[in-house]
Amino acid sequence: MSRAIAEAVVARVGSGAEVTVRLASAVPPNWSGDLTSASIDPAARLGAAIFVTFLNGPAANLRVSADVRIVADYVRASHALLAGQTIAAADITPVRDVVPAMPLRHLPTAAELLGARMIRRLNAGDVVQAGFVMTPPVVQMGEPVTAIARIGDLEVAARFVAEDNGRIGDLIRIVNPDTKRTLRARIIKAGTVEVFNER
């Protein structure tokens, strides 16, 4: 279970993150669902217990809480940054450290932030979060995307079409061009999304 939660956290914040999980609630002894595929609450924040759902059919899901510590690459403001400012290399400092209390979302890299526009003011040393900047979308509505679904150790990929624009870490709608079935997926890189199984 802890491994599944750690993998879901890495998928959320970005590859290369080192995740430590301490379960705050136990699995009921009579629960028989899949403990290899975890779905994190979209509103999860570091610095507080996060809630994770394990699926066992539409009416028998297991919801647990866990404390999570992450060491990852992220970016801090080198000096005060103003709303509307375009980010240059001198404006940001890449670090690898424990991620402080903040929403559990994609941690933008320095390469992703260069040329992005600030949408709020930051002070020197503040973490540059994805929601603080406007970056060009890496997925455009109508474009084909590779959709990845993970079930335990099994990974399946298929071609879908994006129904929304989005940046890395955003949730968008995708549609199967053959069946017309629509799913929600999280953008993990340009042209690639991961099917989001929150129910």
Image: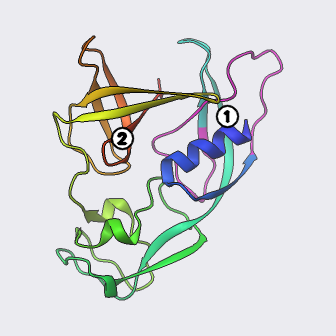
**Residue at image point 44% right, 32% down:** 148
Magenta stretch encompasses residue 35: yes
Graded by Cα atoms within 10 Å as few (under 14), some (14 to 19) or many (20 or more), the crowding at tag 1 reads: some
Residue 108 is situated, as x and y percent measured from the top left of the image, at: 40, 63
Percent across and percent down for residue 37 are 61, 30
Q: Which residues are magenta?
A: 23-51
Disc 2 and disc 1 in contact, CB within 8 angstroms: no
Residue extending furthest toward the right: 29
- The label on residue 91 is none
Residue count near mark 2 (Cα–Cα under 10 Å), binned few <14, some 14–19, many ≥20: many
On screen, residue 159 above or below 8: above
Instruction: Out of 133 and 109, give the one closest to the viewer.
Output: 109
186 shown above or below 68: above
Q: Secondary structure at mark 1?
A: strand
Q: In the figure, is residue 55 to the left or right of 165?
A: right
User: For the residue marked with disc 1, what is the amino acid?
Assistant: Val
Q: Residue at x 69, y 17 (%)?
A: 33
* x then y, percent, for residue 29: 83, 20
Where is mark 1, residue-wise? 64
* Res 86 quadrant in image: bottom left
Magenta stretch containing residue 64, yes or no?
Answer: no
Q: Residue at x 79, y 33 (%)?
A: 26
Q: Which residue is mark 2?
A: 192
Q: Amino acid at mark 2?
A: Thr
